[in-house]
Amino acid sequence: MSIFVLMAGGTGGHLFPAMALAQELQRRGHIIHLMTDHRVASYGDAFPAREIHVVPSATPSVGNPLVFATAAAKILWGTAVAWQKLRAIKPDAVIGFGGYPVFPPFLAARLSGVPGILHEQNAVMGRANRALGRFASRIALSFATTQHADAFLGKTVLTGNPVRDRVRTVASSGYQPLDADGPIRLVVFGGSQGARAFADLVPPAIVELATELRARLRIVQQCRPEDLDRVAETYRKAKVSVELQPFFSDLPERMAACHLVISRAGASTIAELTVLGRPAILVPLPGSIDGDQKNNALVVDAAGGGWIAEQATLSPLSLANRLSSLFGDPAILATAAAAAKTLGQPHAVEQLAGLAEGLALGKHTT
């Protein structure tokens, strides 16, 4: 039995793969602690850890000296807090899942002599992971080609991006091709910013579809509370069957049952879509400094598992035209589903857990 401290920012994109690893390591009899930031309150209740530790952190900005100095001071404070907690926990190894909230505890682990793995979920290595890479014993990658990872070739290993147990549970359910006259199941989601954009784009696009297509649609859409009424009204006027919620706890099951997904292109979303083998229209979050979501989506698009759509050029009419084309040719959707499945890495969590165990047993050293 070993003690592992998992470190992740308090958002789903970082916490979900950390959660998957925690579940697997617990099955193998190990003790898990989680170090994260204050945002964990939205997700942390379900995290399988003996204890959850909130560590101060900040994102440095070089544009404003005062902001940079304040962030640096908070990072130093967080490092001191994490160092004290690590002394009490006495972990055999730590695993960080990216983002600046990982910076203080991972640095504290290095200062304490505890070996660590950094996991990179995206096709572009994040700035925090690049800064911490020199302190890592191993760097686990999700994509065979990952930008900026070349600087760490001696310590990188391809494991894939772990997905939660409930995703793997439904991954064996095959894609059900769209019947010529049957219901069309569409799932739309994308986090808070995605939900806002899709509330503006998707309902008016559905209105543009032919009446016979609208009658067949069965839509599940994530929607911000403040947008629920106006989105519901648009669908009501279009006579479309829809289920709207701010959050779907059973989203993996909904995705497994659908014919098409419209979503952002975050790393966890890509991992789940490809493990399930479901086609998607991917709308990368615009404005990202490193373009991580766009690069994630390009991998899927190049393999034929989905279609990238830039938000800046996407309109309700262009989206309606794309949907009409796809729904009018079920074979295209089925082919894309099969292509997406080829990218899936359902055993990523076992690969990462094995790497963590090896590090804890001293097979790899810093």
Image (cartoon, rainbow, N blue to C red):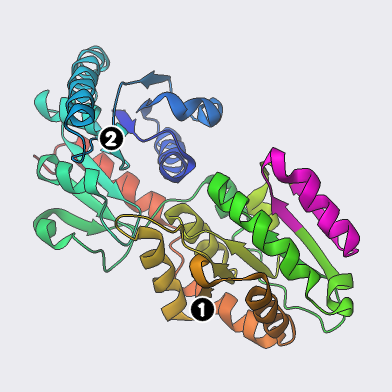
Q: Secondary structure at mark 1?
A: helix
- Residue beneath disc 2: 59
Q: Position of residue 53 (x, y in %)?
A: 37, 19
Instruction: Name the disc covering residue 62, or none.
Output: none
The structure residue drawn at horizontal position 24% and vertical position 15%, both measured from the top left corner, is 81
Give whichever of discs 1 and 2 has the lower sequence position.
Answer: 2
Tell whether 182 sits left or right of 315: right
| The N terminus, quarter of image | top left
Q: Is residue 19 above or below residue 148?
A: above
Quadrant of the rendered image containing residue 299: bottom left
| On screen, residue 313 above or below 75 | below
> What is the crowding at mark 2: few (fewer than 14 residues within 10 Å), some, or many (at least 20)?
some
Quick check: is 231 in the magenta stretch? yes
Could you tell me which secondary element the residue under label 2 belongs to?
loop
User: How many numbered discs?
Assistant: 2
Determine which quarter of the picture holds residue 73: top left
Question: Magenta includes 52?
Answer: no
Horizontal arrangement in the rendering, residue 55 relative to residue 200 (left or right): left
Q: Which mark is residue 339?
A: 1
Magenta stretch?
Answer: 220-244
